Amino acid sequence: MKACWTTAKLWMATPVKMRCKIVYEISETLEAKLKPLSELMAHEVGKPLIKAITEVKRCVKARKAVKYAITVQMGVQGNELTPIIRLNGFNRGAKLVFNKFLKRDEWRPYGVIAIITPFYLQCATLGQNALLALVIGNCVIWRGPVESPLVTIAITKLIAGVLEKNNLTGSIFTSFAGVNELNKAIVMDTRIPLISFKGNSQNGKVVEHMVVKRFGKCLVESDRSDAITVLSDADIQQAVEAIVHDIVGTAGQGLSTCHRLFLHESIYGDVLDRLRQRFESITIGNPLETGTELGLLVSRATKKHFLQVIDTIKSQGGKILTGGSDTKYAGNFVQPTIAEISTSATIVQGGWVLPVILVFKYQSWEEAIEINHKVCKGSGNFIFTGQAEVISTWLREVHT
């Protein structure tokens, strides 16, 4: 931390064009190692190779957001960031006084910030947050996920190589991988004014409480309880493929993986029959092999959690329609699962990063909205319908 703070003063004083150059070189270096990084992630996390490639690309493409922030939001003139002046709704890159009132936007570095990422969005979260933070003039401390330390080490070495090539110290970008006890030390450190956390909601509450308690600033994005609603006029086959892709694509290990499925009573049986057939024909296996649709869970603890969730569903009156157990393969493989349960069951309020989705039947539009709103935590909502006016009403009436 001492090295980070010493370096932070030098990094903030570095001309913005130089910082932009470094960030672009980092992005290009990661892009050049797209395939080996993706293969390492697929091997370590268990997601299919095509999904790993997509995530690493999201990290690389984050440079577009950085470019936008520089050229549009802040503007680069010479070696300095020009603050935007907002006047009657217009952005003007000059100091203008109107009615003796000056309103200006400036992005100022905090010095050192920390980014805590989950295993299921390790690269994407890092790219979106770290690259922009570096451009602004912050030094970055990255707390990589415990489940995938090799990916953390590999990315850190690549970034360190770029910094060294430009005669810059490696403490501009520092990473930690290993035991969970590091999280508390980072979160409680008063020398880190801003913490960015992405992960499960339980840990998110703890992190936010600890940071606010020391009057720090915190950006928290926790897991949700996303839902898919299929109306009677929807393209059923399209909806089925989308549901399968959402649940199976990352073995359910994603922040936006849907946990709830609402089906109109007129298509309930048809959709479930097609989903059963599709789930039972899923290709399970080595995530590095072409054609694999479902890889394995990230750890034994996650597999144990999967089995606990299944037991809880059964104990609360739920019925397993397909899946619900491990597979014939050795390792952390499980079957994608669909379960039917009452909307009043307490497990409906939970959130998990597992290939498990709960299905519910509804009769009317009003009922679909009502049961959607029974979940306390924030959620994303997806709808399948052939009516454009229904989508507009849905966006207006459904809370997220």
Image (tube, rainbow, N blue to C red):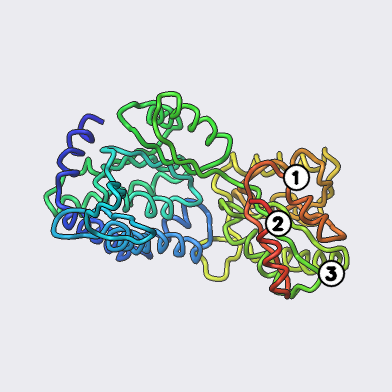
User: What percent of the width, then of the height, locates residue 235?
Assistant: 74, 75
Choose mark 2 or mark 3, whichever is in front: 2
User: What percent of the width, then of the height, locates residue 129?
Assistant: 37, 50
Viewed as shown, does residue 236 lie left or right of 213?
right
- Where residue 201 sits, quadrant-wise, is top right
Choose mark 2 or mark 1, whichever is in front: 2
Residue highlighted by disc 1 = 374
Q: Earlier in the sequence, mark 1 or mark 3?
A: 3
Viewed as shown, does residue 348 lie left or right of 117?
right
* Amino acid marked by disc 2: Glu
Choose mark 1 or mark 3, whichever is in front: 1
Q: Secondary structure at mark 1?
A: loop
Image vertical order of residue 216 relative to residue 258, above or below: above
Question: Which is more toward the observer, 105 or 214?
Answer: 105
* Amino acid marked by disc 3: Asp
- Badge 2 density bin: few <14, some 14–19, many ≥20, Cα 10 Å: few
Image vertical order of residue 179 relative to residue 400, above or below: above
- Where residue 158 sits, quadrant-wise, is bottom left
Residue highlighted by disc 2 = 397
Q: Secondary structure at mark 2?
A: helix
